[in-house]
Image (cartoon, helix red, strand yellow):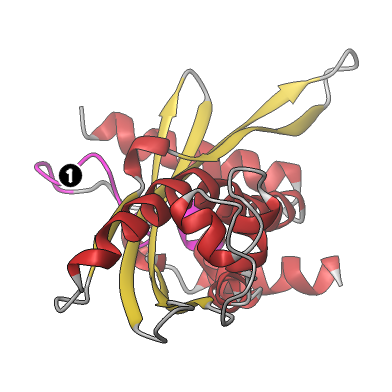
């Protein structure tokens, strides 16, 4: 399976624009997308191959919220912070319309350490248990993963995956539903606060292992060449 993936990567590299191998015109942005970075393109292709958007959409959000330990048992319980309500209709919280910005993945580096930066968003359909009213929210966030090549005692290079995380300050919740009853607002504020604490860990658990697998399936020599290619491009822009 690994050999097939490597073959697909090599075929993808052959199809890359010739701009990857030629000096770029001055004035272009220093943060570049997959059209200028082979590494960004490979990561994007790998995430699409693994159906990352589908994996995120299949997250059992309500179960994760209840299991996080930050809310009382039951949907109403954690919405209002009370354990006194036990008899209620079942609510739901479903992730929909996942959009991972494959074309917007950009690479940065510092002292031979690379960081892949990925932005993504999705909607959440929240059905309230006490009146079946559906509230729609939109979530936006950025995920970054650091990696580099490190020599062992015999001089052989090995891939090291560093921190892979959703930037906490990048997580933003927007309520798309306009007609929200005033009495529901306290519940929704609590929902948003708890959601923004839990969502980063849920997204990391789905995306970070995939990026690790994508990079580790590359031959180390090929990975080193791609990293040097990106560094050369960046230096040409200075």
Residue 157 is at least partly visible in this image? yes
Taking the image as drawn, is residue 21 in sight?
Answer: no
> Would you place residue 48 above or below residue 191 in this image?
below
Residue 48: % across, % down = 56, 74
Q: Which residue is mark 1?
A: 29
Give the left or right position of residue 159, taking residue 172 as reference. Answer: right
- Which quarter shows the N terminus? bottom right
Q: Quadrant of the C terminus?
A: top left
**Residue situated in front as seen by the camera: 110 or 185:** 185
Residue positioned most to the left:
27
Judge by depth and name the residue closer to the eye, 175 or 151.
175
* Quarter holding residue 165: top right
Query: Is 157 a magenta residue?
Result: no
Up/down of 65 relative to 55, above or below = above
The residue shown at (25%, 60%) is: 185
Q: Is residue 234 left or right of residue 125?
A: left
As displayed, is residue 126 above or below residue 204? below
Residue found at the far top of this picture: 153
Q: Secondary structure at mark 1?
A: loop
Position of residue 72 measured from the top left corner of the image (x, y, whole percent): 62, 51
Judging depth in this view, the residue of 16 and 168 nearest the camera is 168
The x, y position of residue 140, in whole percent, is: 33, 57
Q: Quadrant of residue 127?
A: bottom left
Q: Residue at the spot x=66%, y=48% of the render? A: 68
Label count reads 1
- In magenta, the rendered stretch is 25-42
């Amino acid at each position: 399976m690994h050999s097939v993936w490597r073959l697909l990567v090599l075929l993808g590299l052959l199809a890359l624009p010739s701009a990857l191998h030629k000096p770029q015109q001055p004035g272009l942005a220093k943060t570049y997308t997959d059209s200028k970075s082979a590494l960004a393109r490979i990561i994007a292709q790998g995430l699409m191959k693994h159906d990352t958007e589908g994996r995120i959409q299949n997250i059992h959000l309500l179960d994760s919220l209840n299991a996080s330990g930050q809310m009382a048992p039951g949907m109403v319980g954690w919405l209002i912070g009370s354990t006194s309500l036990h008899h209620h209709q079942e609510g739901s919280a479903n992730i929909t319309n996942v959009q991972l910005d494959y074309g917007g993945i950009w690479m940065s580096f510092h002292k031979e350490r690379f960081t892949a930066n990925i932005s993504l968003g999705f909607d959440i359909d929240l059905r309230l248990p006490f009146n079946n009213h559906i509230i729609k929210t939109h979530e936006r966030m950025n995920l970054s993963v650091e990696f580099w090549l490190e020599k062992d005692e015999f001089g052989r290079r090995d891939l090291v995956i560093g921190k892979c995380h959703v930037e906490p300050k990048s997580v933003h919740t927007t309520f798309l539903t306009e007609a929200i009853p005033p009495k529901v607002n306290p519940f929704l504020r609590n929902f948003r606060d708890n959601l923004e604490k839990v969502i980063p860990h849920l997204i990391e658990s789905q995306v970070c292992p995939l990026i690790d697998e994508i990079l580790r399936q590359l031959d180390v020599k090929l990975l080193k060449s791609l990293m040097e290619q990106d560094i050369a491009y960046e230096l040409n822009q200075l």
